[in-house]
Every structure is written in structure tokens, then in C-alpha cells.
Image: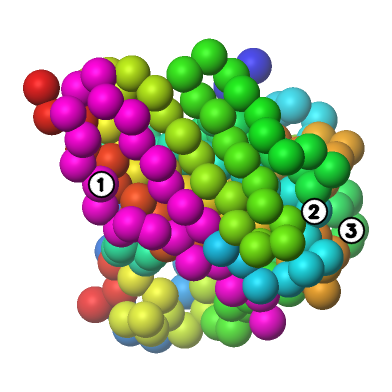
Amino acid sequence: GENVEQHPSTLSVQEGDSAVIKCTYSDSASNYFPWYKQELGKRPQLIIDIRSNVGEKKDQRIAVTLNKTAKHFSLHITETQPEDSAVYFCAASWSDSNYQLIWGAGTKLIIKP
Amino acid sequence: NAGVTQTPKFRILKIGQSMTLQCTQDMNHNYMYWYRQDPGMGLKLIYYSVGAGITDKGEVPNGYNVSRSTTEDFPLRLELAAPSQTSVYFCASSHIGGPTDTQYFGPGTRLTVL
């Protein structure tokens, strides 16, 4: 079945630096790749997404890039701030399951002051 | 709008007991989902629904049942609870785009089976 691998599991960066989280997927027919942020004890919330017909999407300090050939996509956060501390999940749609999402295991992002 | 609401927030069950987790959304979304989140893991889809009267299995449906009699409500039933069902359960909903649309999550139910 579809598999989504997410790296690293924990990422610690200095405030103001950039953070990059990478995900790889196995289903070549996947067409939707969202990123969700989950603060401690809270519900996941969508922060950005990208579809398979686009290579890059940006929203202020957050960007996502997609490489369909290599089957990987990445989340880029620039000028990190303390409120960026959270667990970030990537996901990919799975064509064999009516495009339901398969989720990565998450990356805990720690912003050091 | 309250969005997606879930009850209860916390519950402790004994092995073999049953319970229903409630989920309600007031956004008139067609699609609804139930996920479980184990510690240090991503979300796993249990069941989903594309509209009232229509449900389908996700990745990990064993030990659970669902129903969707109205657009608003999507309860999850656990029969014969087992320790392996200890987890945080999230309900979510999305609009017409289905799983490739923004999913709005409820606050979660933390379930412990002892």
C-alpha cells in the first residue's frame, strides 16, 4: 500500500534560522500533499498544501516544494519564530483508497531562543 | 460556527467494555473522517463517510463501527475494547473536495483501555 516517510523526526533550530522537513511517498498517482501543524495538546490544522500540477507554493514564511519524479515534497519555514514550535505532519493522497490521506509520522520542530 | 466538536474529551475503559465517541460538525460538510493518533505516530484513518448513509473503511477499521444518519453527526463505536485501542481519536470533516480539501479537526478524545 501507500507509504509516507517523514524526516527528521525531531528538528531543533535557532530562532531566526530556516527549517526544512522532507517527506517521500510511494504512490505515483498521488495528487495532493498537505502539511498540518499540531501544537501540543491541540488539534491538527492545515498550514499549506500543494497539488501535483504545481512544483512550488509559498505563503509568507512557509513554502512547499514537490518533486514528482523523485516522489518527495518538502516544507520550508524561514525566519523561524517561537510560535513555530509544534509537530508538523505531511500527508499524501492514496489513489487506491479514493484519495484518502496517508500520513507521515510527524516532525517535532523545536525553536531555540 | 462551533466547527467540529467531539465528546467526551477523556475516557477510561476496561477491557471488553463498549463505548461511542460522538462527533458533530456544523459546517454542512459532506465528508467526515475518524482518525486515531498513537504516541509519536501520524494519523491513521479508521472510517470515513462521503455523505449521510454512506460510510467506508479506512486503513485500520478492525474493532470499530460507524454510522452516518445525518450530515452533522458521525459517531464511532468501539465494541469489546482492547488495550491496543488506547489512543487519541480525532474526528474531521471537509467540504466538497473530499480528502483533497482542507480537513477540519475536532479537539480529540483521549481513550485509555485498561
- Residue at image position (49%, 67%) is A5
**Residue annotated with mark 2:** A31
Question: Start and end of the magenta stretch?
Answer: A1-23
Q: Are marks 3 and 2 in contact (CB under 8 Å)?
A: no
Of mark 1 and mark 2, the one earlier in the sequence is 1
Which secondary structure lies at badge 2? loop
Query: Which amino acid is tagged 3?
Result: Gly
Asked if badges 3 and 1 are on one and the same chain, I answer no
**Main SS type for the magenta part?**
strand
Subunit bearing disc 1? A
Q: Magenta includes A84?
A: no
Q: Name the amino acid type tagged 2.
A: Asn
From the top left corner, tell me how far across and down residue A22 is, in percent.
Answer: 47, 52
Q: Which chain does the numbered disc 2 sit on?
A: A
User: Please, is residue B64 above or below residue B12 in the view?
Assistant: below
* Distance from the alpha carbon under mark 1 to that under mark 2: 27 Å
Looking at the figure, which quarter contains the C terminus of chain A? Answer: top left
Residue under numbered circle 3? B53
Tell me, yes or no, if residue B1 can be seen here: yes
Which quadrant, please, contains the N terminus of chain A? bottom right
- Do the CB atoms of the residues marked 3 and 1 lie less than 8 Å apart? no
> Marks 3 and 1, how far apart in space?
43 Å
The image quadrant of residue B11 is bottom left
Instruction: Work out whether B108 lies above or below A70.
Output: above
Residue extending farthest left: A113
Q: Residues within 10 Å of mark 1 (few under 14, many from 20)?
A: some
Q: Position of residue A41 (x, y in %)?
A: 30, 40
Q: Does the magenta stretch include residue A11?
A: yes
Q: Which residue position holds label 1? A: A11
Mark toward the viewer: 3 or 1: 1
Tell me the kind of residue under disc 1: Leu
